[in-house]
Image (cartoon, rainbow, N blue to C red):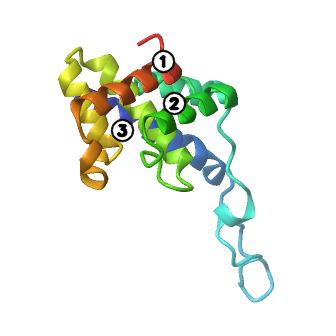
Amino acid sequence: MRTRTATAIAATFLIGLTACGAADNPPAAPSDKGGAEASTAPPSAKAPARAVSPEDLAKAREAAGLAPEPTAKVRQAYLDALNAIDPRIIKPGKEDQAVSRGSNQCRSIKDSKDEAKDAQTALERFTVDTRLPEIATPETGKKINKAVHTYLCPNF
């Protein structure tokens, strides 16, 4: 429950940061030309939202209990490790999803020290238990956790 709360807080923080740009640009005042608005576009369409700085994103990830964003080299090594377990674990074209799920699994590994439970959580998180029942074993879950831990969150 604690990790879900932290994740919700971090997500709210990130959404709030991206929404700041709209709040800084109030609607345009009506013009003197027949009372029509100077523009019919909503304020958020007039000015782009501010981008979240890498530092703020890193702080939000840390607050949510997530590991830092992996470098391109680490990301590829992690994806290669998952493919070595079974190339079907990563859905075609869903590499970002596999990295996101791995990042979330880092949080589970960090919060729990029950290897069997962590292995089952990995199978569920990567939908191996429903998509690939023939490899949905504790051994596969442990291999996924090893890849996650080795590449995405070695400090957990």
> Residue visible at 43% across and 20% down?
149
Total residue callouts? 3
Callout 3 amino acid: Ala
Callout 1 amino acid: Thr
x, y (%) of residue 10?
44, 34
- Which residue is tagged 2? 81
Judge whether residue 26 can be spotted in this image: yes
Question: Nearest the camera: 43 or 86?
Answer: 86
- Which residue is tagged 3? 8
x, y (%) of residue 61?
49, 28
Task: Look at the image and tell me in which quarter the C terminus lies.
Answer: top left
Q: Is residue 94 above or below residue 83?
A: below
Question: Nearest the camera: 94 or 60?
Answer: 94
Q: Residue furthest top?
A: 155
Q: Earlier in the sequence, mark 2 or mark 1?
A: 2
Mark linked to residue 150: 1
Q: Secondary structure at mark 3?
A: helix
Report the side of 38 relative to 126 (left or right): right
> Residue visible at 22% across and 30% down?
138
Front label number (3 vs 1): 1
